[in-house]
Image: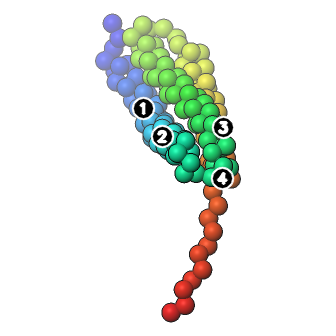
């Protein structure tokens, strides 16, 4: 049986990845809102309410956002593996440092990929938006 001190130490070590998991959940929420907006614009496109340029960019934007969500979700799952590994190491009294380290490195790579894809989608979205200044009315 693991010592209660070791278990308390594992809980302390697991707090940092839990905060990371919370941050990733926030990112996923933003990404999900983006894809919902893209779907809404796709429906408006079917009704002829958007420009041709915007309509042509919706599918590439949807694909990029979907890939960003997938990569970020993989990052979240790998952080969960890190947390489970920290507890598994204490409970099983074995060395899981390689699995924990590899999972954390994989999570960071997946998160970087997700953020890069998300940034690419944002740039693509900005290419389709043109804000024209309105002339001021003289008082």
In the picture, residue 112 is in which quadrant?
top right
Q: Which residue is mark 3?
A: 60
- Distance, label 4 to label 3, CA atoms, is 12 Å
> From where the camera sits, is residue 111 visible?
no
Q: Position of residue 114 (x, y in %)?
A: 60, 34
Q: Position of residue 65 (x, y in %)?
A: 58, 36
Circle 4: is it few (<14), some (14-19), or many (20+) Cα within 10 Å? some
Please determine whether, in this image, residue 44 is positioned above or below residue 92: below
Please give the name of the residue rendered at 68% of the width and 53% of the height, measured from the top-left corner.
Answer: 127
Looking at the rendered structure, the secondary structure element under dot 3 is: helix
Instruction: Return the disc, 1 or 2, that comes first in the chain's sequence.
Output: 1
Instruction: Return the disc, 3 or 2, that comes first in the chain's sequence.
Output: 2
Residue in the foreground of this view, choosing between 12 and 75: 75
Looking at the rendered structure, the secondary structure element under dot 4 is: helix
Asked if the residues shown at circle 1 and circle 2 are in contact, with their CB atoms under 8 angstroms apart, the answer is no
Instruction: Return the disc, 4 or 1, that comes first in the chain's sequence.
Output: 1
Q: Which residue is mark 4?
A: 128
């Amino acid at each position: 049986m693991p010592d209660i001190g070791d278990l308390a130490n594992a809980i302390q070590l697991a707090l940092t990845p839990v905060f990371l998991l919370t941050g990733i959940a926030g990112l996923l929420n933003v990404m999900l809102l983006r894809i919902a907006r893209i779907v809404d614009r796709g429906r408006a496109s079917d009704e002829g309410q958007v420009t041709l340029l915007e309509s042509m960019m919706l599918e590439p934007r949807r694909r990029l956002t979907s890939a960003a969500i997938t990569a970020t979700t993989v990052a979240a799952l790998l952080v969960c593996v890190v947390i489970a590994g920290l507890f598994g190491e204490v409970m099983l009294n074995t060395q899981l440092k390689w699995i924990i380290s590899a999972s954390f490195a994989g999570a960071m790579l997946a998160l970087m990929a997700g953020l890069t894809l998300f940034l690419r989608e944002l740039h693509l979205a900005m290419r389709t938006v043109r804000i024209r200044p309105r002339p001021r009315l003289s008082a």
